[in-house]
Image (cartoon, helix red, strand yellow):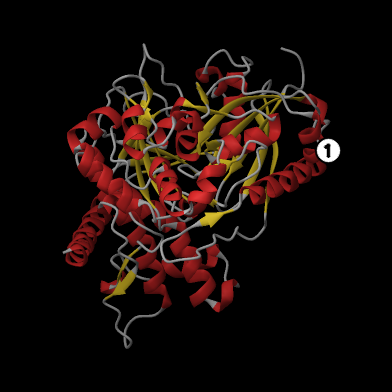
Amino acid sequence: MSKNRLLLGCDVGSSSVKVSLFDADNGTSHGSAYSPKEELAIDSPRHGWAEQHPELWWKHLKLAVKELLFETDIDAGQISAIGISYQMHGLVAVDKKKNVVRPSIIWCDSRAASIGDQAFKELGPEISLKRFLNSPGNFTASKLKWVQENEPDAYEKIDKIMLPGDYICMKMTGEISTTISGLSEGIFWDFESNSKADLLLDHYGISDELLPEAHESFSNFGKLTNGAAKELGLNEGILVTYKAGDQPNNAFSLNVLNPGDIATTAGTSGVIYGITDQPAYDEQSRVNTFVHVNHQKENPSYGVLLCINGTGILYRWIRQHLLYGGSLSYQKMNELAEMAPIGSDGVTILPFGNGAERILENRNLGSGIQGLDFNRHNRTHILRAAQEGIVFSMNYGFDIMKKMGVDTQIVKAGLANMFQSPLFREAFVNTTGTTLELYKTDGAEGAARGAGVGAGIFSSPGEAFKSLERLQVNEPEKEKSKQYKESYQKWVERLEQEIS
């Protein structure tokens, strides 16, 4: 191998944009950077809406890349390929000049849920689940239909629609493309015909010409243009060779690629993502099946995604609005939470305050605190109830996945976000009954490794993960498991009361 073959990974989230430099020769990270330093705002012009302008992602990507190059003092000429991870399910629409038509309707926006639910009924659940493995629900196709119905002037201007990562790739290369995995996450993919979902597009009255050409996740998506290279501080001609949604990419970053492998994460949202070689689905579409990054027609690979919208965003809300205007660190919050007993002395929190929740069949239930006693409880109980409520909601969805045949005794996660909390890890393993393996990686590093696979620098994903470092293992404890499961059952009873 030649020296200094560096890979740049870009993780474009709804909270921040993170970048990482990975050395393909020695399997180590040269550093990372992110922007902004405070979490990105999500615009909500109306109840249930969530938007961000794509130019904002590009702005912060440029800032993060320049900071990374400055901090590492790396020669940009050593970078061989770029990989992109991105927030899933967002709708980006551009005109013929590649200008954005309207702000992106992002993943946690709920406005199109009723459109997707109606399509599910009209097409018939049997056809939708057999062909798309999902209800059209609140996914990208339904968001585009909402624009068609409610903003006809904007819709008429659209030349192509994209996912957030496709937009960033377009800004880098000048070329518009997507992936098969990306089409599946938007409910633009027909698993029976192994092609674009013409059945749903025809039902919605949407031309398939609005969809970009689709490639495998590991592909040549184009070269960095001269203009983009100048804006980023990089060299012209670098190949973009990997694109994936944040949750398939998070799984990839943990080497979760084979049937039975499961990854989890808890940032703004909470996710459990399991791999199967069967096109499995939940009849109520409460968890969702998409094409995984290593899927091939002759060797199928699907990712079953459980997503809870309101996880880290709940903890952030508590920090900003209930605890001294955000001056208390997350570490201190975690320490305070540990002072309350398992079960939070009867305080329960439903973390569903960030839009319609799929595990609740697209209900927008809202969050809430129950059981609060002003004479007995304090902030420690609220903080613990928040962490437990997040874990319990994830386990509620995990139980659905198990009924689909997606089960395991080992779950992998990066040591990041909510999983940095010892209490959260304890609650997770004792509620789910799984062993939790924590690794030194993140989405940006995963995207960098993906770029190496796409560019042929690594001969296989297995070679890309030879250096993946496991940091620690958390296992269930008999007595604590009993206590957590009792608390979980009480939490489920409260949830079911709210639903009914």
- Residue 286: tell me if it is visible: no
Residue that appears at 72% across and 46% down: 64
- The residue pinned by badge 1 equals 73
User: Foreground: 314 or 114?
Assistant: 114
Tell me the quadrant of the picture where the C terminus can be found.
bottom left
Residue that appears at 74% across and 41% down: 65
User: Foreground: 165 or 317?
Assistant: 165
Residue that appears at 66% across and 30% down: 28
- Residue 188: tell me if it is visible: yes
Residue 5 x/y as whole percent: 73, 21
Q: Is residue 254 left or right of residue 59?
A: left
Tell me the quadrant of the picture where the N terminus can be found.
top right
Q: Is residue 462 above or below residue 306?
A: above
> Judging from the image, what secondary structure is the residue with disc 1 in?
loop
Q: Is residue 126 left or right of residue 88?
A: left
Task: Residue lying at the far bottom in this picture: please name it.
Answer: 375
